[in-house]
Amino acid sequence: MEEIKKKIMLSGIQPSGDLHLGNYLGAVKNWGARAEEFDCYYFMADLHTLTVRQDPKMLRRRSLEQLAQYIACGIDPEKNVLFLQSHVHEHAELGWILNCYTMFGELSRMTQFKDKCAKNADNINGGLFTYPSLMAADILLYQADYVPVGEDQRQHCELTRDIAVRFNNIYGETFKVPEAYVPKAGARVMGLGNPTSKMSKSDPNGCVFLMEKPEDIARKFKRAITDSDTENCVRFDQANKPGVSNLMNIYSAVTGKSFEEIEKEFAGCGYGVFKPAVGDAVIETLRPIREEATRLLNDKAYLCSVYTEGAQKASFIARKTLRKVYKKVGLVEKPF
Ligand code: ATP
Ligand code: LTN
């Protein structure tokens, strides 16, 4: 019988800090559950991390920690390809080629570039600018159909599509044109201290990390900013009640309940009851992840076997696409 080819899913996160609830709900949570339906590739975007100055020891440590956390979040290495971006040299090579098909104006318009320039005014380097061409290479190398990411990465995915279409128009069908795959609940988790900006590791007080102790998570939720209306009522209203709406979004993403069900569950209860309840639900969701990641981190040999095998599988696919691209653009075929 003819084998039906599965669609391809691919995503990555920079190991530039500890994974947090935003990364989990916006991205990683949706990765593990897809292995039966798709061929899945997930990696640590360590080359991208170099666009901001890193402590080398920390970067190495975080790359392994992130791998352990991916697995603990349910991404089974037997069913998914897990690897480090830098171990598959085709990423950097295709990244260079795609730089030549990405316009200065396009790169200048990227929101993440503008944000990062504002945050790293003393190190606005070329890598930060061309970050999206490397991301396009990550995706296009594997002919990915879907890229599961949070809302903030949609712009990069759109640019990847534009680059793919541009290249295909010049050279004929070469790349699959991918689509961003953004979840309904959890796509944009906001900071607990400031519900108008996204939860981010750069604001540790408003950010809940996957490896954080339950008592610290509970404290952060108790202190979460709710809204200054006098209503004290759990109701979804993004425009007027961004704090409560963000907590409802988190609660919905971890429990699977709809906003309507949540409003009913907490009818008549004030924020004083709702906030710790969200905290508890998050604690119980993260507990098994933290325990499993801690266990895996003590087994470095296992982690090494996972990323070694992952890089071998990834290289096999990446090599094929790169060979095709080199040929199309006119490079002489390598004799060895
Ligand atoms: P930075 O603080 O440098 O912006 P970050 O930790 O917020 O980084 P990224 O490494 O940029 O996150 O993102 C990793 C993945 O997590 C991406 O798919 C991104 O869309 C998703 N993500 C990040 N923050 C959030 C958030 N607050 N809500 C939902 N998804 C998020
Ligand atoms: N830019 C992404 C990380 C990333 C990525 C990718 C995501 C690098 N390459 C390819 C999806 C597909 C971010 O999370 N900031």
Image (spheres, rainbow, N blue to C red):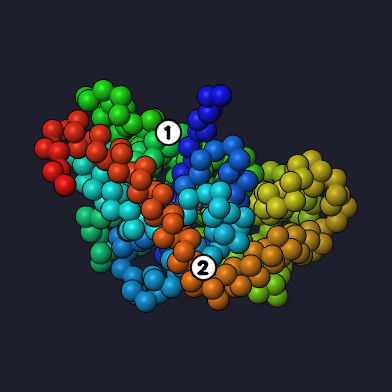
Q: Secondary structure at mark 2?
A: helix
Q: Residue at x 33, y 74 (%)?
A: 56
Q: Is residue 289 left or right of residue 325?
A: right
- Toward the viewer: 27 or 249? 27
Q: Specify the farthest residue to the left.
A: 332
Three-letter code, disc 2 = Tyr
Q: Is residue 184 left or right of residue 325?
A: right
Q: Is residue 76 left or right of residue 144?
A: right
Q: Residue 302: which disc?
A: 2
Q: Residue at x 85, y 56 (%)?
A: 269
Q: Residues within 10 Å of mark 2 (few under 14, many from 20)?
A: few
Three-letter code, disc 1 = Pro
Residue 107 picture quarter: top left
Q: Secondary structure at mark 1?
A: loop
Q: Residue at x 53, y 28 (%)?
A: 3
Q: Is residue 213 in sight in this rendering?
A: yes
Residue at the spot of label 1: 178
